[in-house]
């Protein structure tokens, strides 16, 4: 049984529990609903049902991973709900409870952890030029490849400070600052979450290979 | 209120309420603590430097660029690897550093950061126990304490506030040098600027005025188009995971198709991600389908508000990094009649275009 009281205590769910009137505005303007077979209205409905089986099924499916987090739903909801914020909470609980492993899109969290998580932990940035290769990002085009080949020169032309001490764009984050954010990641549950993602996905892959 | 009445005098819209006037917020006038963007630093570092140069050289404002700041972790939060408590504590650390530096007006370069900071502030207000937990977590993990900022503004709010002063100092206007007509500009306001908390954005979510007022003040024509409010398509995990990157491309394409019939000379953005995607996806569509969204055969140039302000103020296009755009901005520079070292710009572009032939 999933811990319903804990899940419903999440501020992102508590704040978005105003009775949905099923108007469908969120679905009508949702970019994810354009692209996938997805309705933010459905997510809100399951939350308001407070049915543990239905919620567990939702958190175990690809469905919660379709949202693009643009929050267009929040802007126009007549009840001030934000289905996108509810999705954030459900994705967290799906990972925390190990339910994400049941869906292919959920398991892709390992890719996010291995990229964005690694960047944050090692460099203090979510995104860094050195981690944006053309192999992974062919859409960046030839100008980006040229920039990667000439990083120091390019940044010097625009008064940048790439990988150097002191202030400025793309500066090297001081070691003391990196230690502080690593301590925050460790002390507030991020590292535990990352270990959980990695362990669950690797175990699932091993089981499938047996 | 008198000013609003004057604006609508003898207008057919005289009796209509001007809704966006409900969404005016306090914008601090000086002493800014600048918070950089991971995406802007990566792709368009010259844009942030242009903003700081305008603050210093043109507006004579004081700011501080603290090297101890790190990522806000917003991309990690919206791609679901950063728990809420971690996000709160990271933001608390940034506030603590700002306190230490003696500043209280936070000015944010990134729309994702602006979104998470306003969300965190709202959560702390609605659920005070989460603020106490953030204080406890910050103390426990770093030994730090913090106070809330007096004001939070996006960097485009500052340019909006001083748009008239920038117009006064401008060397160029948003006018086609050859025809004398205003250039047609479409704005794209990043979703997290005002869709989450409309009262934090100039004009709110429905009537975003922050960019369109700059365009009008600087001589251009604001072009409305059906998908003006549509997301650029970033989608966080949708883009970050290669398999679902088509989500991002699809939504950018929806916007290009919608704006193309209005023949815009320029796309103006306020969000680092939106700016990069609208620049890069035009290249991808051109490469994969041959479709180009401008009659010049170049694509529609995409600029940030800082880049545009700097250009009009006479800053050098190379110095502000316009050669780093995939969609060439040269046609726009020529329409504006910008005087600059074209050889240097052309040489940099040629180097990357030579690479394109190899790729």
Image (cartoon, coloured by chain):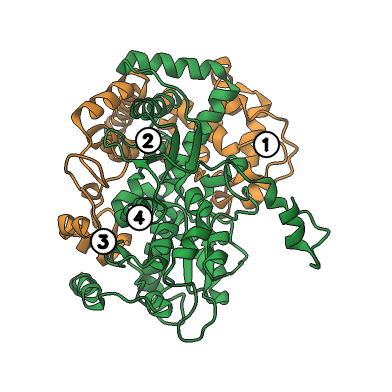
Chain colours: A orange, B green
Asked if marks 4 and 1 touch (Cβ < 8 Å), the reply is: no
Residue in the image at 52% along x and 37% along y: A64
Q: Residue at x 32, y 28 (%)?
A: A194
Residue A206's place in the image compared with B65, above or below, is above
- Disc 4 and disc 3 on one polypeptide chain: no
Marks 4 and 2 sit apart, C-alpha to C-alpha, by 31 Å
The residue labelled by disc 3 is A144
Judged from the image, the secondary structure of the residue bearing numbered disc 1 is: loop
Is residue B290 among the parts visible in the rendering?
no
- Label 4 or label 3, whichever lies nearer to me, is 4
Circle 2/circle 1 CB separation < 8 Å? no
Query: x, y percentage for residue B350?
Result: 21, 75
* Distance in Å between CA atoms under marks 2 and 1: 26 Å
**CA gap, disc 1 to disc 3?**
41 Å
Tell me which label, 4 or 2, sits earlier in the chain: 4
Looking at the image, is A136 positioned above or below residue B308? above
Q: Would you identify the image quadrant in which residue B258 lies?
A: bottom right
Discs 2 and 1 share one subunit: no
Left or right of residue B148: residue B19: right
Give the Cα separation between the discs numbered 4 and 1.
Answer: 43 Å
Point out which mark residue B73 bears: 2
Q: Closer to the camera, B155 or A29?
A: B155
Q: Secondary structure at mark 2?
A: loop
Asked if badges 4 and 1 are on one and the same chain, I answer no
Q: Position of residue B251 (x, y in %)?
A: 50, 58
> Would residue A157 appear left or right of B338 to someone viewing this image?
left
Q: Going by the image, does A106 lie left or right of B213?
A: left
Earlier-in-chain disc, 1 versus 3: 1
Residue that mark 4 sits on: B57
Q: Relative to B92, does residue B356 appear above or below in the rendering? A: below
Q: Which residue is mark 1?
A: A80
């Amino acid at each position: 049984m999933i811990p319903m009281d804990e899940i419903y205590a999440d501020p992102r769910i508590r704040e978005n529990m105003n009775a949905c009137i099923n108007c469908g505005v969120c679905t009508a303007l949702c970019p994810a609903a354009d692209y996938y077979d997805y309705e933010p209205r459905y997510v809100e409905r399951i939350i308001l049902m407070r049915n543990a089986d239905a919620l567990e099924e939702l958190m175990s499916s690809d469905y919660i991973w379709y949202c693009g987090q643009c929050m267009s739903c929040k802007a126009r909801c007549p009840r001030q709900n934000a289905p996108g914020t509810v999705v954030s909470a459900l994705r967290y609980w799906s990972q925390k409870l190990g339910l994400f492993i049941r869906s292919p899109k959920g398991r892709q969290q390992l890719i996010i952890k291995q990229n964005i998580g690694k960047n944050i932990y090692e460099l203090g940035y979510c995104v860094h030029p050195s981690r944006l290769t053309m192999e992974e990002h062919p859409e960046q085009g030839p100008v980006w490849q040229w920039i990667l080949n000439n990083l120091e020169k390019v940044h010097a032309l625009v008064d940048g400070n790439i990988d150097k001490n002191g202030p400025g764009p793309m500066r090297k984050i001081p070691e003391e600052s990196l230690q502080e954010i690593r301590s925050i990641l460790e002390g507030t549950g991020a590292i535990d979450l990352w270990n959980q993602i990695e362990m669950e996905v690797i175990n699932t892959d091993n089981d499938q290979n047996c | 209120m008198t000013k609003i009445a004057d604006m609508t005098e003898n207008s057919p819209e005289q009796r209509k309420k001007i809704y966006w006037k409900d969404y005016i917020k306090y914008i601090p006038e000086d002493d800014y603590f600048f918070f950089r963007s991971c995406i802007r630093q990566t792709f368009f570092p010259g844009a942030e430097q242009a903003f700081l140069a305008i603050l210093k050289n043109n507006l004579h404002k004081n700011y501080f660029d603290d090297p101890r700041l790190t990522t806000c972790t917003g991309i990690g939060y919206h791609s679901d690897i950063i728990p809420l408590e971690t996000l709160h504590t990271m933001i608390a650390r940034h506030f603590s550093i700002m306190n230490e530096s003696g500043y209280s007006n936070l000015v944010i370069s990134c729309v994702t950061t602006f979104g998470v900071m306003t969300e965190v502030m709202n959560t702390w207000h609605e659920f005070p126990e989460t603020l106490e937990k953030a204080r406890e977590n910050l103390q426990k993990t770093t030994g730090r304490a913090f106070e809330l900022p007096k004001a939070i503004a996006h960097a485009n709010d500052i340019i909006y506030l001083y748009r008239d002063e920038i117009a006064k100092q401008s060397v160029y206007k948003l006018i086609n040098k050859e025809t004398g007509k205003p250039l047609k500009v479409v704005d794209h306001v990043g979703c997290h600027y005002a869709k989450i908390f409309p009262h934090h954005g100039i004009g709110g979510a429905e009537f975003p005025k922050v960019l369109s007022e700059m365009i009008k003040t600087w001589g251009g024509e604001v072009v409305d188009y059906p998908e003006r409010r549509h997301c650029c398509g970033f989608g966080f995990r949708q883009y970050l995971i290669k398999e679902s990157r088509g989500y991002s491309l699809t939504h950018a394409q929806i916007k290009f198709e919608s704006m193309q019939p209005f023949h815009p000379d320029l796309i103006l953005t306020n969000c680092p991600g939106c700016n990069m995607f609208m620049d890069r996806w035009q290249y991808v569509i051109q490469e994969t389908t041959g479709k180009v969204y401008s009659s010049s055969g170049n694509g529609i140039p995409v600029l940030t508000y800082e880049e545009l302000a700097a250009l009009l103020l006479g800053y050098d296009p190379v110095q502000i990094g316009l050669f780093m755009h995939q969609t060439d901005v040269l046609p726009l520079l020529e329409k504006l009649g910008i005087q600059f070292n074209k050889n240097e710009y052309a040489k940099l572009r040629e180097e990357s275009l030579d690479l394109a032939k190899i790729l």
